[in-house]
Amino acid sequence: MPFLSDDVVMRDIVTHVDAMHGHQAIVDFFGPGAGNLKVMPEQYYLNERGLALTWMAYLHIINDHHGAENQGKWLCGEGMSLLEFRDDKVCLEIDYWHGPQGMCDDWRSHFDTRKAMSPGELGAISGA
């Protein structure tokens, strides 16, 4: 929370219909799964108002909600975020993505493989 303005607004296009306003709304949304979530930045694009970045998200499956055979695996999904700043703090975040696109056994190995790909190779894949 120290990087977010007190009146921060956050939108998650896929999983949250309404904008979240303030720290508590964001904690309420991300808190239950935060310990099992990795969002790894890939590319950054800066301008005078803020930045946009692409990322790969990984959610560790710890229950059988996705089937017992998937327990311990990682749901994967590509996305992009727009962050706008005011007084060196994020005042707006909008996350764009399609939702989980696949699954992998090891998020670090999957992400390292992505880092070794060219932009063309990354653009040609869909999902995990």
Image: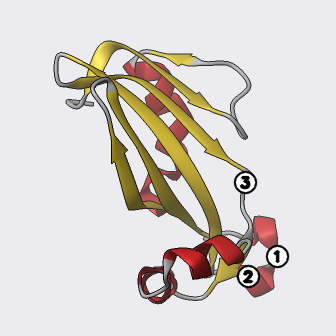
| Sequence order check, earlier mark of 1 and 3 | 1
Residue pictured at 48% horizontal, 55% vertical: 54
**SS state under label 2:** helix
Count of numbered marks: 3
**SS state under label 3:** loop
Mark in the foreground, 3 or 2: 3
Q: Quadrant of residue 126?
A: bottom right
Q: Is residue 127 placed above or below 118 in the rendered structure?
A: above
Please tell me the numbered disc located at residue 70: 2
Please tell me the numbered disc located at residue 67: 1
Q: Amino acid at mark 1?
A: Gly
Please tell me the numbered disc located at residue 11: none
Number of other residues with Cα within 10 Å of mark 3, as a class: few under 14, some 14 to 19, many 20 or more: some
Residue pictured at 42% horizontal, 80% vertical: 115
User: Hey, which residue is sitting farthest right in the picture?
Assistant: 67
For this view, does 98 lie left or right of residue 94?
right
- Residue 13 visible in the displayed image: yes
**SS state under label 1:** loop
Front residue (pair 108, 83): 83
Instruction: Kindly report the distance in space between the C-alpha atoms of the residues bearing marks 2 and 1.
Output: 6 Å
For this view, does 40 lie left or right of residue 28?
left
The image shows residue 10 at horizontal and vertical percentages of 51, 25
Number of other residues with Cα within 10 Å of mark 1, as a class: few under 14, some 14 to 19, many 20 or more: few
The image shows residue 90 at horizontal and vertical percentages of 31, 26
Tell me the residue that label 3 is attached to.
99
